[in-house]
Image (spheres, grey):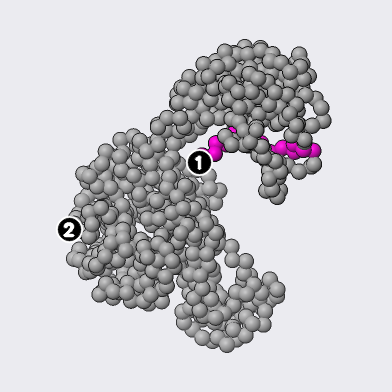
Amino acid sequence: MFLFLSTIHRETTDSDGELEYIFTSSSALFVYNVRTGALEYQSATYRGTDVAVGNVDKDPDLEIVIATGDNSPGHVLNGRTRAVKWSHPNGFGSMVRIGDVSQQFPGQEIVGARTWGAIVVFNAVVRSPLYDQPSFNNAALKIADVDHDGRNEIVHGDAQWGSVWVRDGETFALIGSFNNPEHGVTDIAVADTDGEGTNEVLWGAGYTSTGPDYLFIGDIETYTIAWRSQDIVPPFYAIAHGDLNNDGTSELVYGSYESESGYSGGVWFVRDPQTWELIYASPSNRSAFNPLMRIAVADVDNDSRAEVFVGESQGYTGYVVCYGSPTYQRRYQTAGLDGLSIWGIQVADVNLDGTPELIVSTGTYLYFYNARTGAFIWRSVSLGLSSWSPLAFLRIGNIDTDPALEVVVAEEEGQIVIYDGMTRLQQLATPAREVTALELADLNDDGIQEVLVGAANGALYLLNPTTGGILQGLGNYGGRIDGLAVADVLGTAEPDLLFCVNGQLLVRYVDPSTNQVAVWRSPTVGGNAGRLDSLRVADLDHDGRHEIILNVGFGLRVFNLITNTPEGDINRDGCVDDADLLILLCQFGESGNNLSADLNRDGRVDDADLIIVLFNFGSGC
């Protein structure tokens, strides 16, 4: 069963000082208390297509005006008693608004628009239609003082292409119109969007077609379109960060899966990590048929400004484009890979020759390129156990005792393959491992990174990079592991593991007071959160706190995890007290990694840590 809701209003309809939500649908009229959420009124008699709230007859009470369709009666209810005050047999059309548009009669007028037909102005005091404007096919209606002359205009939008019209509220004389380049009008707003003292007209369009959907802003002085939004199709699997302008902070770079309702490739963006202001947005690539899955950021020419590497396509031919910063001009494009999408991008000097390599994974192959020029270096044999599962997870690191870096690539819900970056010889190919998340991190500070794997069955474990077996289990979390990152977000001595399960963000940490593993779970943040390697953790703005950058399916979110534990709270009970001082004194003089009382993380518990506890003693208690 579908429930079609009209415009939702928030008013004090019953004069009790409490705000109510008022909306109608195809089943009933509803009134809810805003503060409590309690249902105050419901009536199937007054189900309709639209509703408006205002004072239309000059008495002390507000009225609820209900439109029930082009050829159905319209109703005016007392907002306090919900009694019918007036019904018009011809109705108010399918859309209704309230505003003072006529100076001839008291009260606010009811302006109703038929989907197929005229726009009519009614007055509830005299209970009569006043005048109308013939129209073919209406989709949106608004009453506002567009030009700041103290009189309301009537703004309406055509349902099929056409225009958005601004008319005199008293006479329906045309003041101006905006050509609407997309199909239909979803809604109309009037506001001073640029703070220059003049209103603009805003409308949405494209929803009623399979093509792109846009928000338009129109200039009322020229009646031309001043701005148009981009049509962005989530999720946001492509996430990266790096210093693009040599300002000491890491800009956030991310990209949408597609754009233009799926008819164009993804759009990528750059944002300032301190203000979150949009610095750059790429144009849509109308010739791209492959989705945007990966972006990487790395300084490959040693100019202190990182380059941006984006997985793009022409038709179904995938390639990587290197963009220079801060102008974001195209530097080069790798050779096209016919029929292949770009699923992984990493940049590292894997063969230790002083020149960084661009490592790319596709549906079935690994590719090495010169990261400075894009020149092809090497391609692997076909990898993976299934031609339908992409090589979605790619990491570069040192996971053994030799100095060369290793390339670790994993097939979604399939096998893990490890290559020596210097010899390009395959070191390991596992059986199917149900891989859904992959990360490399040095968990014990021995200079060798561990291979962390998350699986579709909820298991999290360390992989033995020599045998391909499970080196150590890290628990099972009851659902597919999506996204995986290692960082110190809680301020404990041991590194924290961050990942997503069933739309929740989880943080696995070692509780310093018990030395036992604990897990913190967020509320649900979005469906498919972290899916396909779309979780990153970094201190973007260099304020000492890590940001958690997370794809949540319908959008991208950036979090700070607030722990509410004061500095010096070693046992993390929210209070710096004798218990913390006792822990510090018991560890005083010790050296090593992961000491809970090593508050300044210099590898030893000494006077510097004691000063932190004493300075903050009593905090949070």
Which residue appears farthest toward the right when viewing the image? 60
Q: Which residues are magenta?
A: 1-15
Where 38 sits versus 351, above or below?
A: above
Q: Position of residue 449 (x, y in %)?
A: 35, 71
Say which residue appears at 59% left-offset and 36% top-offset. Answer: 27
- Residue at 31%, 58% (x, y): give it: 412
Q: Amino acid at mark 1?
A: Met
Disc 1 element: loop
Q: Position of residue 279 (x, y in %)?
A: 48, 43
Q: Amino acid at mark 2?
A: Val
Using the numbered discs, state the Cα–Cα distance from disc 2 to disc 1 in whole angstroms.
Answer: 52 Å
**Farthest-out residue, front:** 45
Q: Quadrant of residue 433?
A: bottom left
Provide the major secondary structure of the magenta segment. loop
Q: Who comes first in sequence, dot 2 or dot 1?
A: 1
Pinpoint residue 96: horizontal percent, then vertical percent.
63, 26
Element under label 2? Answer: loop
Residue 327 among those drawn in magenta: no
Q: Pointer 1: what residue? A: 1
- Where 465 falls versus 187 (above or below)? below
**Crowd rating for badge 2 (residues with CA inside 10 Å; few <14, some 14–19, many 20+):** few
Q: Name the residue beneath numbered marker 2.
A: 381
Residue beneath the point at 35% across and 40% down = 265
